[in-house]
């Protein structure tokens, strides 16, 4: 079948997801995109841009759109009533955490709701996000003064399910004997923004350095035009430990750094799935992750006690233990790496193609 993919924020994990789906699917997928900037205006105006960009929409069997747009507007403008539409939420504006001093603009969350109602089928990238989204609808309903649309919760829930995003693993994991266990490399590979909570990460790293525990750092991940002050300070404070600093353009170079890594750490406030962590674990890093968000869902249940921490103090304790006794955790490293293969596109694509075929009535 022919599928139209609409991505209004074509960058980072959104871009990688779209390209991976196109590469692995058995169906023909045309990707129409907008640049990954000005997200509020994408929510407001992407439908208008896509309406003008897409020609001969009747040639498609299915539309696949992601959540940073007003799907109801596009559906009305393009007159796609007879065409099935999938809406995929990488994130949503009902549950996205607010930065200090920020007030929630409920209109963007309401756009997510009307988009979900306009879609034939809605997929969330984790059960965590789906559950949080549905719960947040109750909070929204409480602030609506009258004519409360109480029916929307059940309507969205009955058409929603979870479909994990696929990962494009470039190479196999590093062999254990390639890791420097005397000076293990700690990986940070998240966006350099407040919601990834770098302050807690550097707080923990500072304590380890004060204890004279040897380690190296690779501070990777996408960043805005202006580098946050916490990273500028870290560049000076950990100058002896940093071996890589900043976004790596080359995918091959990035994967090579992950393969050299011993540990990947997250201190995130917001994470609906965690592709960067899964990539690092698949390439051989042992993760240390907060016991919340999507992490308990996507990691193997029998190893959660080893890789999840409850607070900053426990993060320091577990990180210190890993750094000083890494040789004793090589077996865990291999087990976790193999587990991550379940999130590869070559495995998950069967679920996507099956859903596409089911939605248009082939199955």
Image: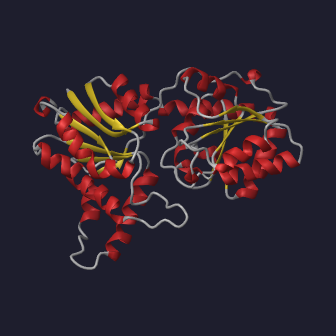
Which quadrant holds residue 222? top right
Which residue is found at the position 43% from the left and 53% from the top? 129
Which residue is located at x 19 percent, y 51 percent? 73
Q: Residue at x 38, y 64 (%)?
A: 105
Image quadrant assignment for residue 132: bottom left
Percent coordinates x, y for residue 97 in the rendering: 49, 59
Give residue 265's position: percent from left, percent from top.
66, 43
Residue 76 appears anywhere in the view: yes
Q: Is residue 25 left or right of residue 361?
A: right
Viewer can see residue 305: no
Residue 98: % across, % down = 49, 61
User: Where residue 153 appears, x then y in whole percent?
Assistant: 29, 64
Would you say 97 lies left or right of 188 here?
left
From what the image shows, is residue 358 above or below residue 168? below
- Left or right of residue 165: residue 184: right
Foreground residue, 203 or 82? 203
């Amino acid at each position: 079948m022919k599928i139209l993919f609409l991505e209004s924020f074509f960058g980072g994990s959104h871009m990688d997801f779209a390209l991976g789906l196109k590469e692995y699917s058995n169906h023909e997928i045309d990707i129409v995109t907008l640049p990954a900037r000005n997200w509020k205006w994408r929510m407001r105006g992407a439908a208008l841009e896509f309406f003008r960009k897409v020609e001969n929409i009747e040639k498609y069997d299915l539309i696949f759109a992601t959540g940073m747009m007003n799907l109801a507007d596009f559906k009305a403008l393009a007159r796609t009533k007879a065409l099935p539409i999938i809406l995929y939420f990488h994130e949503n504006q009902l549950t996205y955490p607010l930065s200090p001093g920020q007030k929630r603009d409920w209109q963007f969350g309401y756009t997510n709701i009307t988009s979900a109602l306009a879609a034939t089928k809605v997929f969330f990238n984790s059960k965590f996000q789906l559950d949080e989204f549905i719960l947040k609808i109750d909070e929204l309903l409480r602030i609506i003064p009258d004519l409360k649309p109480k029916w929307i919760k059940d309507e969205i829930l009955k058409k929603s399910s979870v479909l994990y995003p696929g990962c494009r693993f470039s190479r196999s994991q590093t062999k254990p004997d390639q890791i420097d266990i005397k000076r293990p490399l700690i990986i940070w590979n998240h966006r350099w923004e407040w919601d990834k909570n770098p302050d807690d990460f550097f707080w923990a790293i500072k304590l380890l350095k004060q204890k004279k525990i040897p380690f190296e750092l690779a501070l990777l991940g996408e960043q805005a035009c202006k580098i946050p002050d916490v990273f500028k300070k870290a560049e000076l404070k950990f100058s002896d430990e940093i071996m890589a600093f900043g976004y790596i353009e080359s995918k091959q170079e990035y994967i090579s750094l992950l393969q050299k890594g011993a540990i990947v750490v997250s201190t995130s406030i917001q994470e609906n799935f965690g592709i960067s962590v899964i990539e690092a674990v698949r390439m051989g890093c042992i993760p240390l992750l907060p016991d919340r968000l999507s992490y308990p869902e996507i990691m193997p249940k029998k190893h959660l006690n080893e890789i999840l921490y409850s607070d900053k103090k426990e993060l320091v304790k577990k990180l210190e233990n890993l750094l000083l006794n890494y040789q004793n955790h090589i077996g865990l490293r291999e087990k976790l790496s193999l587990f991550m293969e379940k999130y590869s596109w070559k495995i998950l694509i069967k679920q996507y193609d099956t859903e596409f075929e089911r939605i248009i009535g082939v199955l």
